[in-house]
Image: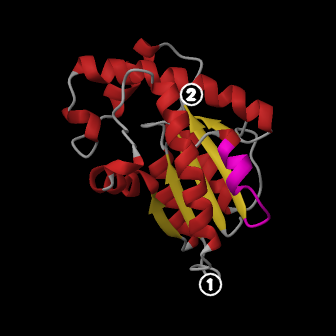
Amino acid sequence: MKKYVIIAGVPRAGKSTISKRIAKQKGYQHISMDAILAGIEKNFPECKINTNESEDALKNYRYISSKVAPFIRAMINSGEYEECDYGVVIDVFQLTPYDFQTYIADEKSEGYFIITSDITPEERFNILKQYDTPDDYTYFHSDEQNMNDCRDIVEISNWIKKECGIYNLPYVDTTYNRENIINEFIESLCDDRKNKIIG
């Protein structure tokens, strides 16, 4: 496993779960870009980041990614972690395969995309309800809002899958058999070997 591990992907696909477990298992520092973005969005309106923009979710995802990717690169270039004997795992929603490849990918950084594709929004909604707990932000959303979000998640997941193919980047689809796939992926990554579940 490299010094910097980027776990990108759509909400509620398991990226934060994966990131936290990798951090715990390997002794890496875990950084949630979603939390950092929430702070930037609230306190620096001049950055024009609106994570709740619902007019065109894919367009907004790509726009925010164009800001996030150079930000992550600047964090890596800061040298803050170079002398540490541990690595860093960053979990992030708004990061496109193109922006990862353009700004972040190098000999010290690797990235994986966690998606839920090849599914209808209705099926995605049912999966969301199955795993929803009071610890999840979606638990307190209306069914209508969650259904709209599921439409966006499916659209963005399918787009990410296509883009990963273009840029030859690995993705993990957690649509079905989620727990097993997540466990196998973490085991394969922490053992520094690739697993067949990675697309």
Considering the numbered disc 1 on the image, is that residue within a helix, a strand or a loop?
loop
Q: Nearer the viewer, residue 65 or 138?
A: 65
Res 110 → quadrant: bottom right
Q: Does residue 104 belong to the magenta stretch?
A: yes
Q: How busy is the neighbourhood of tag 2: few (under 14 within 10 Å), some, or many (20 plus)? A: many
Q: What is the residue that sits farthest to the front in this orientation?
A: 46
Q: Which label is found at residue 134?
A: none
Locate residue 113: give its quadrant.
top right
Image disc number at residue 85: 1
Query: Which of 131/137 is in front?
Result: 137
User: Which residue shows up at 32% across the image and 49% down it?
Assistant: 45
Residue range (magenta): 99-108
Q: Position of residue 197 (x, y in %)?
A: 70, 38
Tell me which amino acid carries mark 1.
Asp
Which quarter of the figure is the N terminus placed in? Answer: bottom right
The label shown at residue 157 is 2
Residue 176 picture location, percent across and down: 54, 27
The colour scheme is secondary structure
Residue found 45% across the figure and 51% down from its top: 17
